[in-house]
Amino acid sequence: MSWAIRFQLRQHVRQSLWLVPLLGTVVGAAAAQLDLWLEGRVSMPPGWTYPASTATGLLSAVAGAMIGLLGLVVTIGVLVVQMATGTLSPRFMRLWYRDRLQKLVLGSFTATFAFSFSLLRQVGTGSVPDLGVTLAGVAVTADLILLLLYLDRFVHALRPVAVAAAMARAGLAVLEEPMPPSAPSHQAERMALDDAPPDLRVRASASGAVQAVQVQQLVRLAAERGWVCVLRHAVGDFVINGGVLVDVYGPTRPGDARRLAGLVALGHERTIDQDPAFAVRIIVDIAIRALSPAVNDPTTATQMINHLGGLLAGIGSHDLDGRGLLVDGAGRLRVVFPTRTWESYLDLAVSEIRDYGQSSAQVCRRLRAMLDDLEDGVLPVNRAAVRRQRAVLDTSVAHTFPDGRDRAFALGVDRQGIGGAATVPGRQHVRG
C-alpha cells in the first residue's frame, strides 16, 4: 500500500462521522457481555438491587434516551452545515468533521445504547443484572456531561472569530513541521533543469487537488537512486487526469513511476495538513462574506483581519526563499517543488478584503494598521511587499473617498477599525 493511499485512509478516518459510533456500538455490546459474566461474581449492596420491572423500565428509558440524544447531535450537525455555508466558509466543514469531542459524544451514545439494549435480554430471562443497571445509570450521567461539553463547544467554537483563531493556529503549526534541509544556493542548478528533458515523467492517474507530499521519503529515494525530482505542482494545486506530477532526472527503472506517484496524495479538495495558505483562504472567505451587501458586517471582517495579521506575522518571520530546494545529507540537490512566496501569501490575505471592503473606512483603517504591524514584524527581506500593499490600499482609498476629510479618516491607522486608542504622543513609527 502506497503512502498516498495510507494518507487518504487517515484522512477518511479523521473525517468520518460513522466509524467511532460503530466502534462504540461494538464496545457497548462487548461491555454488556462482560457485565453478564460479572453479575454472579460481584455482589451488590442491598440498596443497589432492582426488581425486574424497574430494571426493564430503566434500561428501556436509557436506550430510548440515547436515540433521542443522537438525533439532537445530528440536528446540531445540520445547523453547523447551514452556518458554515451561510456565515463561515464551506471549506471549514472539512476541519469540523475532525472534531474529536463530536466523535466521542456519538461513540459514547451508541455504546450506552448497545449496552442497555443488550442487558434487556437478560431481564427477560428472569435474572436482573443489578451491576449492569447501575453502570447504565453511570453511563447516562457521563453522556449528559459530554453533551453539555459538546453544546458548549458548538456555541463557542463556531463563532467567526473562534474559527479564525483556530485557522491561524493550524496554519502556523504547519510552518513549524520539520522538513528536510533546503539550500537556496542551488537556484542555478534548479533553473538548468527547466531546459533539460526529464528521464521520466510521472503523471496523475486521476484528477484532484494535491493534498500532501511525502517529501522525506522522496528525498531518501532520490538520494538512493541518484535522482533530482522536480514536482510540477504545489500543495493545494488542482491537477487534471494525466497532468505531470513529477519530472525525474536520472536513471530510472520500471515501476518507478508508480512508486513516485504513491508519494503524492490527491483528493477532491484541499486540506490544511501541508498547506498554510488554506488557513489564510478560510479566514479571507469569512471576511469577504461579512463584507457582502447581504450581510454588511465590517466588524466581523476586522476581527478576521486581527487573526489574519497574526498568521501573516508568523509566515513573514520565515525566510521562504529556497524552501522548495531540498538536499540530501551530502548537500546535493534532490527534490525541487514550487512554494509560495511571501508576496503570494500577502496577496491572498489582503487583495480580496481590500477590494470588497474598500468602501468601509473601518476595514481600510484596520488593514492599514495590520500592514504597519507586519512591516515592523516580518523579516527585512519581506518588508518591500508590505509597503507595496500599503501603497495599493492608499490608492484604493483615494479613489473611493473623494472628500478630503473622509479620505484622511479612511487613511488612518486603527487596530479596532474605528474607535481604537489614540497613538501614544511622541512615539514615532519606525519603518525600514
Image (tube, rainbow, N blue to C red):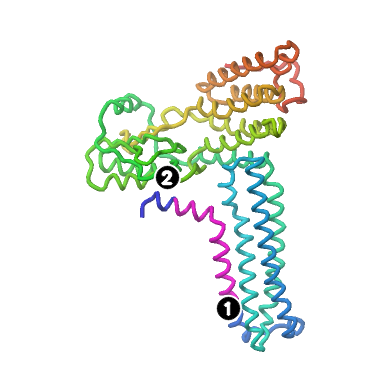
Q: Of helix, strand and loop, which one carries label 2?
A: strand
Instruction: State the residue position of label 1.
Output: 34
At which x and y percent is residue 89?
61, 40
Nearest the viewer among 160 and 375 is: 160
- Amino acid type, mark 1: Leu
Residue 343 vertical position relative to residue 262 in the rendered view, above or below: above
At which x and y percent is residue 55?
72, 80
The residue under the point 22% across, 39% down is 251
At which x and y percent is residue 191?
33, 25
Q: Residue furthest front?
A: 294
- Amino acid type, mark 2: Leu
**Quadrant assignment, res 84:** top right
Tell me, yes or no, whether the highlighted magenta stretch contains residue 352.
no
Nearest the viewer among 216 and 9 is: 9
Magenta stretch: give its range.
Answer: 8-33
Magenta span: chief secondary structure = helix
Residue 252 vertical position relative to residue 127 in the rendered view, above or below: above
The residue under the point 61% across, 68% down is 111
* Of pointers 1 and 2, the one earlier in the residue sequence: 1
Q: Is residue 224 left or right of residue 300?
A: left
Tell me, yes or no, whether the highlighted magenta stretch contains residue 17.
yes
Q: Is residue 393 left or right of residue 278?
A: right
Nearest the viewer among 313 and 260 is: 260
* Callouts 1 and 2 close, C-beta under 8 Å: no
Rendered-image quadrant of the C terminus: top right
Residue 47 vertical position relative to residue 361 in the rendered view, above or below: below
